[in-house]
């Protein structure tokens, strides 16, 4: 009964984290800003940390089934 919400949350976090990491990498590689008004390196670092944290949280949720 409790595995349904855990699977849903894990998949959502994993997809968001993977998508954010892919988007950040693509923007950074092209030389485009990741966030407007912030240095490229700082915004890419913060976005990468957030994407990694979301991906790790998704993996954690999926392994706790």
Image: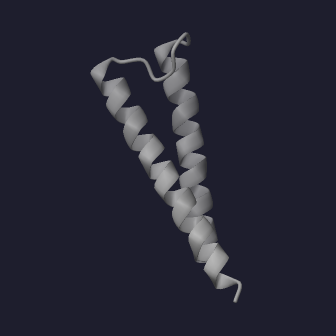
Q: Residue at x 53, y 44 (%)?
A: 51
Image side of residue 3 versus residue 52, left or right: right
Q: Write down the quadrant of residue 10 in the picture.
A: bottom right
Q: Position of residue 64 (x, y in %)?
A: 65, 77
Q: Residue furthest right?
A: 2
Which residue shows up at 51% across the image and 20% down it? Answer: 35
Q: Residue at x 58, y 30 (%)?
A: 46
Looking at the image, can residue 55 be seen? yes
In the picture, measured across the screen, residue 45 lies left or right of residue 4, that is left
Position above or below: 12 against 40 = below
Q: Quadrant of residue 29?
A: top left
Which residue sits furthest left? 30
Q: Is residue 2 above or below residue 14?
A: below
> In the rendered view of the protein, which quadrant contains the N terminus?
bottom right
Q: Image quadrant for the C terminus?
A: bottom right
User: Which percent across, then down, holds residue 47?
Assistant: 54, 33
User: Is residue 65 visible in the rendered structure shown here?
Assistant: no
- Residue 43: image x %, image y %? 54, 23
Against 12, residue 46 (above or below) is: above
Q: Position of residue 55 (x, y in %)?
A: 54, 55
């Amino acid at each position: 009964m409790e595995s349904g919400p855990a699977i849903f949350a894990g998949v959502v976090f994993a997809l968001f984290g993977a998508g954010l990491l892919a988007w950040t990498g693509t923007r950074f590689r092209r030389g485009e800003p990741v966030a407007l008004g912030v240095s490229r390196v700082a915004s890419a670092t913060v976005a990468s940390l957030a994407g990694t944290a979301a991906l790790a949280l998704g993996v954690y949720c999926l392994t706790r089934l």
